[in-house]
Image (cartoon, rainbow, N blue to C red):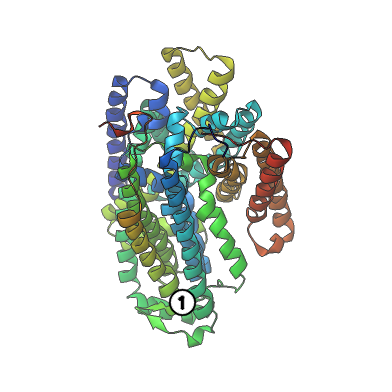
Amino acid sequence: MPKGEKRTDWRFRIAHREALIGCALAVFNIIWWYGFAYTLGSKPPEDYTYIFGFPAWFFWSCIMGFIVMVFLVYLVVKFVLKEVPFDEERSDER
Amino acid sequence: MNWEVLVPLLALLFVIFLIGMWSNRKMKQSSSFLSDYFLGSRELGGLVLAMTMAATYGSASSFLGGPGAAYTIGLGWVLLAMTQVATGYFVLLVLGKKFAIVTRRFKAVTLIDFLKERYQSKSVVLISAFSIVIFLFAAMAAQWVGGAYLIQTVTGLSYLGALFLFAVAVLIYVIIGGFRAVAVTDATQGIIMFVGTLVLLIGVVIAGGGIDQIMADLVTENPNLVTPFGHDGQLTAAYVTSFWILVGVGVVGLPQVAVRAMSYRDARSMHRALMIGTIVVGFIMLNMHLIGVFARPVLPGIEVADQVIPLIAMETLPPWIAGIVLAAPLAAMMSTVDSLLLLVSSSVVKDVYINYFKPDANRAHVKKVSIGFTATLGVIVFLLSINPPELLIYLNLFAFGGLEAAFIWPIVLGLYWKYANKHGAIASMVVGIGSYIAIYQYNETYGNLFGVHAVTIPVFLSLIAFIAFSLIFKKEPYQF
C-alpha cells in the first residue's frame, strides 16, 4: 500500500484471521465427513460393523463429525476469537 | 377436525401474535423506522441471532421435503443433509466482524445497501433487487404450499382453507412487527423446532423397537438403505459432496442469511451465536433426517414424501404432543416466509423506491409504503400458491442456487478483495445467474452435468468472471 493512505483498520486484521479460521474449519469438516463416509461406507453392506446401532461409517461421519465440529467451534470461540467494538470512533467507550 | 392436535398448534400461533405485538410496541420508541423494521436496530443478542439464522434457514425442505427424501433414499440422504452443519459456523465466521463493521460504517440496512455503497453502481443495485425478487418468490411460494399441506394433513381442512389460515397468520405478524418481531419469533420458533425434533426422535425410536431393530429392518428390506449411496445405489459421492456448495458454504451468498450477519449487537453476541447456531443446526438436520429414515420400518408405504413427518408424528406420539411437535415445521415455514417477505419488500421499497424514486420520503410515508408493499406481496404469493406447480418444493432449492450464484462473490470478494469493483460484480452476477439457469435446465433434461448439483459450476464461473472483469476494467484498490 502506498504511503499516506489510511492504515488498515486494526479490527480488520482480526476479522481477516477469523474468516480464514472459518474456512479452515469448513475444510476440516468436509475431509472428516467425506473420509469416513466413503471409506467405511464403500464396503458391501453385509460387512458393515455397527456402533450404537448405526453403521460405522454413519456413526463416524455424521454423528461424531457433528460432535467434533461442535467441540472445535467451542475451542475457537473460547480461545481464538477476539472481541472488537463494531462502532466507529467511539470504539473504546462503553 | 382433529382438535387434540389442533389446540396446541393454535396456542403456538397465538403466542407468536403476542410476541409480534410486543415487538411492535418497542419499535414505536426507536428513532429510525427503516433500520428497525428491516434490521431490528442491530440489537440482536447471541441466542436470538443463532435461532433466527437457524429458523430462517431451516424451512419446509428441512422439515418436510428433506426427511421425506430420507424416508425414500435412506442414510445416504442424511449424509447429504449433514453438509448443512457448516452453515452454523461458516457464515458468521466468514462474513463475521468485517461485515458487521463495514455495514455499520456504510449505515447499510439491507444487503443491497452494502453492495450499493461498496460498488457505487446503479446496475449492481438493480440486478440485485431483481434477482432477490425473482428467486425469493419461488422460495416463498414453496414454503406457503408446504405450510398449507401441513395444516391440511392435521386439520382436514381443504387445501385452500389451510393456505388461507397460514397466509393470514404470517401476514399479520410480519406487517405489525417487522424484523425485530421476525427475529424474536424466529428465536421462539427455533426453540420449538429443537424440542420438537428431540421429542419426535424419541417417539420414533421407541415405536421402531430401538435403533438396532430399525437398522435390522432396513437391511432386511433393502441393504442399500444403510449405505451412503441411496436406495438404488445412484447417489454418487460427487453429487452428495456438491451439496457442500449448495447448502453448506454457499449459504454465505443467501441474502436472507447475510442480512442477519449485520444485525447483531456486539462481538460477544456473535461468539455465542456461533456456538448455539452450530449445535442447533446440526442437531435439527441430523435428527429430522434420521427420523425420516427411522419412519420407514415404523410406517411403511407412505406415498407423498411431504406427509412423512406429519403422519409419523400423529402415529407415534400422543395427540397433544403431536400438535406441539408439528408446530415445529410450521414454525420453520412461517419464520422462513416472514424473513423472505421482509427481504423482498426491503429490496423493492428501500433499495429501489427510496434510492431512486423518492429519496426525500418522510418516516410516515416510508412506513406506509413498506407495510403496504409487504401486504401486497403476501397476497400475490397467496394467489400463486393456490394452484402450485407439481414440484414446488424443488423451487426452493432452485432459488437457493440462483441467489448463491448471484451474490456469493459480490459479497465475499467485495469484503475481502480490494481490487473488487463494479465491473467484476456485474459480470459475476450475470454469469452466475445465466449459467445457473442454463445448467439447471440442462440437468433437468440430460442428467447432472459432471455428476454434480447445478449450482457447482456457476459458482466457479462467476468467480472467474468476477476476477477477470475486475482486473480488466480498472485495477484500483478500494479502501474501506
Q: Position of residue B32 (x, y in %)?
A: 38, 21
Q: Most extreme residue toward the left, as rendered?
A: A94
In the displayed orientation, state which residue is furthest to the front.
A3
Residue sitting nearer the eye, B259 or B348: B259
| Percent x, y of residue B218 | 46, 77
Front residue of B241/A77: it is A77
User: Could you classify mark 1 by the number of other residues whose Cα lies within 10 Å: few (under 14), some (14-19), or many (20 or more)?
Assistant: many
- Chain letter for mark 1: A
Residue B333's quadrant in the figure?
top left
- What residue would you read off at disc 1? A57
Residue in the image at 51% along x and 76% along y? B227
Residue B243, can we see it?
A: yes
Is residue B1 in sight in this rendering? no
Indicate the position of residue B121 as horizontal and vertical percent values.
63, 28
Image point (41%, 47%), residue name: A14
A26 lies above or below B158: below
Q: Mark 1 falls on what kind of element?
A: helix
B121 or A5, which lies in front? Answer: A5
Q: Which three-letter amino acid code belongs to the residue tagged 1?
A: Trp
